[in-house]
Amino acid sequence: MQRRTLFGLAAATALPAPAFAQGSAARTLRVVPQANLTSLDPVWTTAVVTRNHAFLIYDQLCAQDAKGEIRPQMVEGWTTEADGLTWNFTLRQGLRFHDGEKVLAKDCVASIKRWARRDPFMQVLQPSVAEVEALDDRRFRFRLHKPVPLLTMALGQTQFPCFIMPERIASTDAFQQVREAVGSGPFRFLADEWNPGQRALWAKFDGYVPRQEPVDGLAGGRAPRLDRVEWTIIPDSATAANAMVTGEQDYWEYPLHDLLPLLRRNRELVVQQRLLDGTYGICRFNHLHPPFNNPGIRRAVAMAVDQRDYMRAVAGNERDGWEACEGVFTCGTALATEAGSDILKVRNIDRARAVLKDVGYAGEKVVLVAPGDYPQINALSMVTADLLTRLGMNLELVAADWGTLVQRRVSKEPVERGGWSIIHTTSSGQSLALPVFHLFLRANGSNAWFGWPEDAEIERLRQAWIEAPDAAGQKQVGDALNRRAMEVLPYIPLGFYWQPSAWRRNVTGVFRAPATVFWNLAKG
C-alpha cells in the first residue's frame, strides 16, 4: 500500500483535535507557505513567497481592488494638472515605519526610484518621467515629459508592487539585495526568529492605522487582527496535510492537488479557491548560452510540448481543475489570442526531434533546475525533463530546493560555471493580462527577467500597445505580440490550473484577492 493511501485512511478516521487553550495559540495563525522564504527583498527578486512576505510588512501608495481598479492606499489621493504633465500625491496621516519613524514623502521617492529600475511596467513608462520629487513631508510629485495615464496602474499593480521602505534602505542599489526588512504595513518581521528552511514569523504592528473602508481585493482596510503569523516550512505534502488535519497548522497556501479530496472530507477544514485568477505555468529558457541562445532549438522544444501533459502533472484530472491556454496573454481577457500559436499545437516528439537536428543541436549540455520542495513547479519541471530526454538532448537534471533555485537563477554564467539552461515558475493570470506588466514577455536583454531574452520587435510592440488609441488598436498590437513571441519564444506557456488553499474553520475573515495576504484574518 502506498504511503499516501495509508495516510489517507489514518486521517479519514482521526479523532477531532482538542481545542487550543486560550492565549497566544489562539492569536497566532500557523501557515504552511507555498515555498521557503530565502530573500526578504521584493525588489531584488520576483519570487511570490517574497512578495507574500512583503504584503505583510510593507504598504503601497495605491492598490488594486477585486475588479482590478486602482484605489488610494497610503495616499489620501492624487491630483493632475490640466496638461497631464504633473501628478501630485499626498500621504494620509498617521503612517509610521516599524522602527517608529514617520513615513515621509522622501521615503516614497526613494522607494519609487529603486523599484522603477526593476519593474517591467515602470521601465516602459520611465522615458516619459522627468522627475519624482518630494515637495514637503507629506507631498511628492511626478513631473512628466508627456502624459502617462497608466501611472497609477503601475504604482498600484500586484505583479511587482511598489512597496514603501525607509529612505535609508530604499537608497540601496536596486540590483543589490536588501537584508533589513522594515516597512509600515500591518505586521513587523521578526528577524531574530527567522530560520530559513524552517520558519519565519511576523508580529502585529500596533502602530499601524488601516484605512477605514472595507477590504476589497488588495485595497481598503488592511487590519491586523492576529498577534502573530508563523510560517512553517514543510516540504513533504503528506506531512503538511497531516498537520492540517490534526490542527497543528491553520492554513495551507498551496495544497497538493491529489490530496484535495482527503482535505475536503475533513469537516474541520475549508478548501476553496482564494486567488482570483488561475495559476499559469512557465518554461523559461536561458537565452545567453547554448543551446537555447539558438531560436531554432527553442522552437524545436516548443513543438514537442503538450500543455495537457503539464497540467495533468500538476492538477491531475480534477474536474474544472485546469485548462490549456496556448498564447502569452491570460485566457478569457481582452488580449487573449492564439494568433501565431500554431507551434504549440504540433505536439509531436518525432517532428521536434527532426527539427532539433536540422537547426544544429550538437549535444550541448542542458541544465534543468527543479525545486523538489515546491510540488507544483517540480511537476512542471519533471514533464520537461522527460520531454528533453525523449528528444535526445544532453540533460542534467539538478534537484534543489526553491530557495536555492531562486538564488541560482540570477546567475548569467554558463552551465559549466554554475549557470542554468531551463527553469520553471508560475504566475497569476492577472500578471499576464497586459503587455506592460507581463514579466516573461519583456525582451530587453540584460534588464529582462531571468533568462534575459532580447528582441527589439517585442519591445517596439510593447510601446505601441501603450500608444494605441483605443481597445481595438490594443487588441491588434496584442495579436502581433503573440505572433512575435511564438517566433522568438522568450518562454513557453504551459497552460493554467486553479490552486485552492485550505484553512481550518476557526480561521475567519478569509477573502478572495489576487495574492495571498493575511490582514483581516482572525481565529475564532
Image (spheres, grey):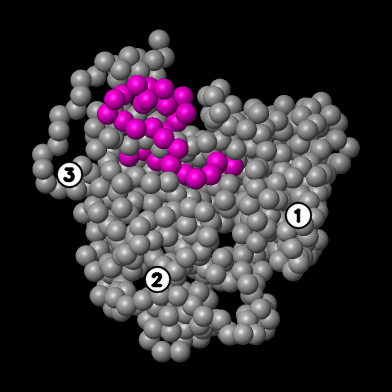
Q: CA distance from mark 1 to mark 2?
A: 33 Å
Amino acid type, residue under disc 3 in the picture = Ala
Residue at 55% across, 41% down: 278
Identify the residue at horizontal 29%, vertical 75% (top origin): 94
The x, y position of residue 248, in whole percent, is 24, 34
Residue farthest to the top? 1
Q: Which residue range is magenta in the image?
A: 251-280
- For marks 3 and 1, the one nearer the N-term is 3
164 lies above or below 141 = above
Residue holding disc 3:
26
Q: Position of residue 479 (x, y in %)?
A: 78, 51
Please give left or right for residue 375 compared with residue 382 in the image. Answer: left
Query: Which image quadrant for residue 164?
Result: bottom left
Q: Return the mark for residue 74.
A: 2
According to the image, label 1 marks what residue?
475
Q: Earlier in the sequence, mark 1 or mark 2?
A: 2
Is residue 161 visible to the viewer in this orientation of the structure? no
Give the residue type at disc 1.
Lys
User: Residue 60, labelled with which disc?
Assistant: none
Label 1 residue SS: helix
The answer to if 362 sits in the magenta stretch is no
